[in-house]
Amino acid sequence: MRTCKTEETIKPAIFAHRGARLEFPENTMSAFRAACDLGADGIELDLQRTADGVLVICHDENLERLAGVNVDLKDLTWRQLSELNAGHTFPGSPEVRFPSLEEFLSWFAWTSLTVNIEIKNSVYPYPLIESEVLYAIDQYKLRDRVVISSFNLDSVVEMKHLAPDLSCAFLFKRYPYRALNAAREYGFDALHPHYVNTFVPRFVSRCRRHNIAVRLWTVNSPRVTRFAIRQGIDTLITDNPAQALQIREELMQRSL
């Protein structure tokens, strides 16, 4: 088992956005294992549900970009989805499959990583998906290593209601102070803003004042990475975890 640094021990934690997606097809077990090997502190992934009720890891609602097939994931059964190649964006590479949440958790449970599960239910609603996700997490007793996020405010509210001890975060791109007010009203543990919000005066410090963690997405620029770290964010979500880890190490060495 690889022992990873956790979000509580080193800040900011570095989360691999959809795994090590620069090296392997995004949101696949290959990408997740590679992110772990790189030394990432956590993994961010996206969750949807098949027509027959299987929770699966995939970002896009339509599979044309990822699998070369113009069909919505929600309309496929698990068997039909399993026949598709999730590595369409990596032509010439070995075929890979879209993993189920169960497959991921059975591997993840043996690591020391943190996982950010983004529930993708803003375009297509998945009724009761929050309780299904919670059930899957609880089968492995992983509440202390899981963060739930969504752009769907109602979904985050529902998850926090079902599991007050689970870390829940609202994802957003604009209007940071509206998001902060919502986090305070509903008792969210964190906010997941688009990185441009770090440039909003005093936003990060106000979140810290209210004991609300800030996990920033998706930060790939070295300049923004350095700026965000100096702002004191809690977690940096990136497509390039190797670069972010190197910059974090450099800044830590300079502070010694």
Image (tube, helix red, strand yellow):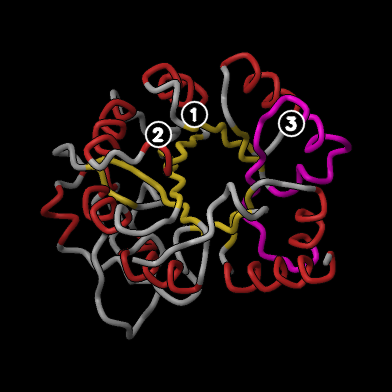
Q: Nearer the viewer, mark 2 or mark 3?
A: 3
Q: Is residue 216 magenta?
A: yes
Q: Are marks 2 and 3 in contact (CB under 8 Å)?
A: no
Disc 2 target residue: 121
Residue 199 in the image: above or below residue 185: below
Image quarter of the C terminus: bottom right
Q: Amino acid at mark 2?
A: Asn
Quarter of the image holding residue 35? bottom left
Residue 226 in the image: above or below residue 185: below
Label 3: which secondary element: helix
Query: Spatial distance from mark 2 to mark 3, Cα to Cα?
Result: 26 Å
Q: Nearer the viewer, residue 50 or 246?
A: 246
Disc 1 target residue: 152
Extreme residue toward the top, this view: 185
Q: Which of the two discs, 2 and 3, labels the residue nearer the N terminus?
A: 2
Task: Name the mark on residue 207.
Answer: 3
